Amino acid sequence: LIESGQAKAADRDEQSITPLHWAAINAQIAACRYLLDQGAEVDALGGDLVVTPMQWAARNSYLI
C-alpha cells in the first residue's frame, strides 16, 4: 500500500496508532525498518496507553 501511494508510513488509525506501532507490537523487525526508511515517526504517540512504537517493543521484550 505504501509503495502504491495508497497509504503512508505516518498514517494513523482512529486511536492514533501508526503502522510502525503495529509492526513493533508484533515484532516485525523488517517491517519496522522499512517503515522507518519510509519516514515513519519513531516517537509517535498512540493507542489507549499513549505510547511510542519503541515502548511497545520494550513492553513485549522485542528490543534487540
Image (tube, rainbow, N blue to C red):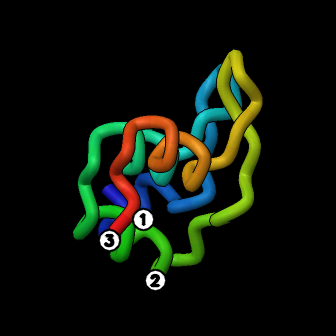
Residues at badges 1 and 2 in contact (C-beta under 8 Å)? no
Cα distance, mark 1 to mark 2? 15 Å
Image quadrant in which you'd find residue 25: top left
**Outermost top residue:** 48
Cα distance, mark 1 to mark 3? 5 Å
Read off the residue under disc 3. Answer: 3
Residue closer to the observer: 56 or 37 = 56
User: What is the crowding at mark 2: few (fewer than 14 residues within 10 Å), some, or many (at least 20)?
Assistant: few
- Number of numbered discs present? 3
Q: Earlier in the sequence, mark 1 or mark 2?
A: 1
Residue closer to the observer: 27 or 40 = 27
Residues at badges 1 and 3 in contact (C-beta under 8 Å)? yes
Cα distance, mark 2 to mark 3? 12 Å
Amino acid, disc 3: Glu
**Percent position of residue 46, x then y:** 70, 34
Examine the rendered structure and indicate whether residue 43 appears above or below residue 25: below
Read off the residue under disc 1. Answer: 5
Kindly identify the residue that appears in the image at 23 percent across and 69 percent down: 30
Kindly identify the residue that appears in the image at 57 percent across and 55 percent down: 54
Read off the residue under disc 2. Answer: 37
Amino acid, disc 2: Asp
Amino acid, disc 1: Gly
For residue 34, the mark is: none
Kindly identify the residue that appears in the image at 41 percent across and 49 percent down: 24
Under circle 3, the secondary element is loop
**Percent position of residue 27, x then y:** 27, 49
Q: Quadrant of the C terminus?
A: bottom left
**Percent position of residue 9, x then y:** 52, 61
Kindly identify the residue that appears in the image at 50 percent across and 48 percent down: 58
